[in-house]
Image (cartoon, rainbow, N blue to C red):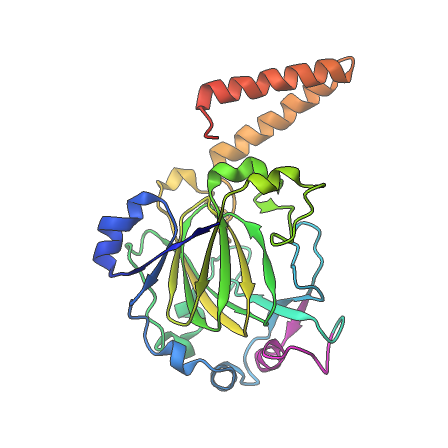
């Protein structure tokens, strides 16, 4: 296991010393405003719990390990005040599935089908408390996402196509990361790993996972984690947790899907390549037996490796 590097940091030395490394860093000492001291559950309920406020749509899961591939959770809509009350508890008196269910809010845009999340515009009652690390011009910033979670909730391992800062405001959490070069060891379905329990994985089912190099850090209120694009990350909340992500486009515009309000679709070039791959696999299925299918699949893999010099 590797520890993610921790550094006292300013905008200037982050950009000049750390950003180009394309490695994660825990940044300490940034001025993010008074939010870590102010944002108790009671404060959030007072600011956002009015009756005229829109209810929030949250993940409700009876298990610690939330699984986005097999959807082991429900989506439910709650008044914000009720959601905050429940999210602070370890055991529920009112529940949808079971008394030990966990809750997770990933704020959406005003029109989730068209608009990215924008913390400052969507939560003006809280915006004055938090100074987000906007280290890049407004034309680069894609979204800012409020996230609130129950204690002992663990989010699935996945990658994002944009760089982002994870700004921890309330609670302690652990973040485990894996380098992009470990993609072949993580049993991916799209952008997500099939391995839910990364601390006690089933190595009979997922034998290559043991080869994945693990990076780990703990975040406390006021910490900012830089997560470079394509780095896999898995998040475990120890406490009632409040955080905000800031995502930005570090590549040119043509490498992002213009119709993606979540910012999690692969580059259009990759989407087209994967569609071509799907067609190629259908052609291999037409071969007379598994011997031929296996042989020519290996030839295709060899051609990819020779062309792109995949890192091992």
Q: Quadrant of residue 189?
A: top right
User: Total number of numbered labels?
Assistant: 0
Give the x, y percent position of residue 192: 59, 46
Give the x, y percent position of residue 167: 40, 65
Which residue occupies the foreground of this view, 251 or 94?
94
Q: Is residue 221 above or below residue 213?
A: below
Q: Residue at x 40, y 77 (%)?
A: 36
Which residue occupies the foreground of this view, 264 or 151?
151
Q: Residue at x 60, y 61 (%)?
A: 154
Q: Residue at x 64, y 48 (%)?
A: 195
Give the x, y percent position of residue 3: 42, 54
Q: Residue at x 78, y 12 (%)?
A: 288
- Can residue 296 be seen here? The reply is yes
Give the x, y percent position of residue 83: 61, 77
Q: Which residues are magenta?
A: 75-95
Tell whether position 147 is magenta: no
Q: Is residue 73 left or right of residue 149?
A: right
Q: Is residue 293 above or below residue 120?
A: above
């Amino acid at each position: 296991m590797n520890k993610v590097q921790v550094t006292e940091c300013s905008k200037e030395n982050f950009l000049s010393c750390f950003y180009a490394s394309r490695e994660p860093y825990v940044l300490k000492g940034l001025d993010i405003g008074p939010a870590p001291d102010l944002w108790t559950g009671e404060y959030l309920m007072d600011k956002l719990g009015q009756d005229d406020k829109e209810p929030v749509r949250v993940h409700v899961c009876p298990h610690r390990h939330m699984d986005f591939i097999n959807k082991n959770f429900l989506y439910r809509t709650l008044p914000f005040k009720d959601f905050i009350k429940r999210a602070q508890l370890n055991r529920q008196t009112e529940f949808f599935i079971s008394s030990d269910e966990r809750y997770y809010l990933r704020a959406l845009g005003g029109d989730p089908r068209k608009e990215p999340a924008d913390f400052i515009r969507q939560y003006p009652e809280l915006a004055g408390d938090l100074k987000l690390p906007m280290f890049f011009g407004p034309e680069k910033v894609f979204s800012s996402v409020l996230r609130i979670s129950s204690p002992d909730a663990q989010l699935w391992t996945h990658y994002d196509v944009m760089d982002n800062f994870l700004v921890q405001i309330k609670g302690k959490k652990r973040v485990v990361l894996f380098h992009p070069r470990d993609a072949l060891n993580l049993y991916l379905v799209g952008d997500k790993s099939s391995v839910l329990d990364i601390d006690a994985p089933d190595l009979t089912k997922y034998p290559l996972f043991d080869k994945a190099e693990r990076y780990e850090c703990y975040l406390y209120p006021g910490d900012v984690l830089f997560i470079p694009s394509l780095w896999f990350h898995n998040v475990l909340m120890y406490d009632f947790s409040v955080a905000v992500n800031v995502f930005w486009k570090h590549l040119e515009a043509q490498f992002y899907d213009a119709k993606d309000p979540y910012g999690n679709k692969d580059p259009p070039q990759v989407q087209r390549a994967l569609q071509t791959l799907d067609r190629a696999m259908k052609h291999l299925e037409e071969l007379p037996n598994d011997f031929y299918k296996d042989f020519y699949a290996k030839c295709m893999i060899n051609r990819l490796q020779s062309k792109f010099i995949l890192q091992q």
